[in-house]
Image (cartoon, grey):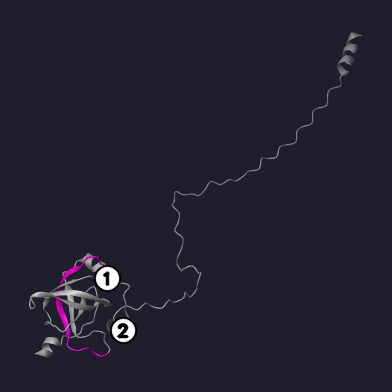
């Protein structure tokens, strides 16, 4: 019975589990009251409660706790998903139970994820992801230097200008056409020609 009750199969965790140390009020109908517990890791999908008061997988609970940097508590319903009777070698989770969130609003989930972004990730989660995908999740990747620093990215081009834009008006200076040389003034007629003619007709 115990093997069936507490031997829930571990599933691959989709959300990053962040290490915390916060107090959580857990209410269960079996207890009849809210009992404070210690939470050691939180994700956007649920949390891990370190406790000896274990509930059966599938039990419904109500959680009240302050996520990191929250000024007001988070009230959320949960369901016991996994129970550990003893600490596993190499894992940070002590005896306790994992509770999955139920009916967590989208804005609450987003805010919870943002508030835990700077917290360290649980090593067991990183190990699970490395085993499944070969890529550790929750660990920053090393910075890789650019292969060709300073080079323009291949295939990139500046966006074309609008069709109606033709650029600033050109200021081309045209040279004035060369003027033809002025004609020299005609030589004046012989002033004494008229006097000579008049004297001839007078005789």
Residue assigned mark 1: 68
Instruction: Identify the residue under disc 2.
Output: 130
- The residue located at (90%, 15%) in the rendering is 196
The Cα atoms of the two marked residues, 2 and 1, are separated by: 27 Å
Name which of mark 2 and mark 1 comes first in the sequence: 1
Q: Name which quarter of the figure residue 192 lies in.
A: top right
Farthest right residue in view: 203
- Specify the quadrant that holds the N terminus: bottom left
In the displayed image of the protein, which residue is found farthest to the top? Answer: 202
Q: Residue at x 10, y 74 (%)?
A: 33
Residue 91: x and y, percent?
26, 86
Mark 2 against mark 1, which lies toward the viewer?
Answer: 1
Residue drawn at x 87%, y 12% as measured from the top left: 198
Q: Position of residue 65 (x, y in %)?
A: 20, 71
- Front in this rendered view, residue 52 or 80: 52
Q: Nearer the viewer, residue 171 or 141?
A: 141
Q: Secondary structure at mark 2?
A: helix
- Residue 27 as seen in the image, left or right of residue 90: left
Q: Residues within 10 Å of mark 2 (few under 14, many from 20)?
A: few
Quarter of the image where the C terminus is located? top right
Tag 2 near tag 1, CB within 8 Å: no
The boundaries of the magenta stretch are: 70-89
Asked if residue 74 is among those painted magenta in the image, a careful observer would answer: yes
Q: Which mark is residue 192?
A: none
The secondary structure type at the circle numbered 1 is: loop
Q: Quadrant of residue 118?
A: bottom left
Query: Relative to 188, does residue 182 appear above or below in the rendering?
Result: below
Q: Quadrant of residue 56?
A: bottom left
Q: Is residue 156 left or right of residue 77?
A: right
- Judged left or right of residue 40, residue 28 is left
Say above or below: 131 vs 172.
Answer: below
Q: For label 1, count other residues whose C-alpha is less than 10 Å away and answer few (under 14), some (14-19) or many (20+).
A: some
């Amino acid at each position: 019975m115990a093997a069936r009750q507490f031997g829930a199969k571990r599933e691959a965790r989709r959300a990053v589990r962040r290490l915390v140390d916060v107090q959580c009020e857990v209410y269960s109908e079996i207890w009849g009251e809210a009992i404070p517990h210690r939470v050691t890791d939180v994700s956007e999908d649920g949390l891990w409660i370190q406790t000896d008061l274990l509930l059966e997988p599938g039990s419904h609970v109500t959680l009240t706790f302050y996520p990191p940097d929250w000024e007001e508590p988070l009230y959320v319903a949960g369901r016991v998903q996994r129970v550990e009777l003893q600490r596993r070698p190499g894992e940070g989770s002590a005896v306790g139970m994992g509770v999955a969130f139920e009916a967590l609003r989208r804005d609450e989930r987003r805010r919870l994820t943002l508030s835990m972004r700077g917290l360290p990730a649980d090593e067991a989660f990183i190990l699970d992801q490395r085993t499944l995908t070969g890529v550790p999740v929750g660990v920053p990747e090393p910075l890789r230097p650019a292969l060709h620093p300073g080079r323009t990215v291949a295939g990139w081009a500046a966006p074309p200008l609008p069709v109606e834009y033709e650029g600033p008006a050109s200021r081309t200076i045209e040279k004035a056409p060369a003027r033809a040389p002025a004609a020299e003034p005609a030589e004046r007629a012989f002033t004494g020609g008229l006097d000579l003619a008049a004297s001839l007709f007078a005789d």
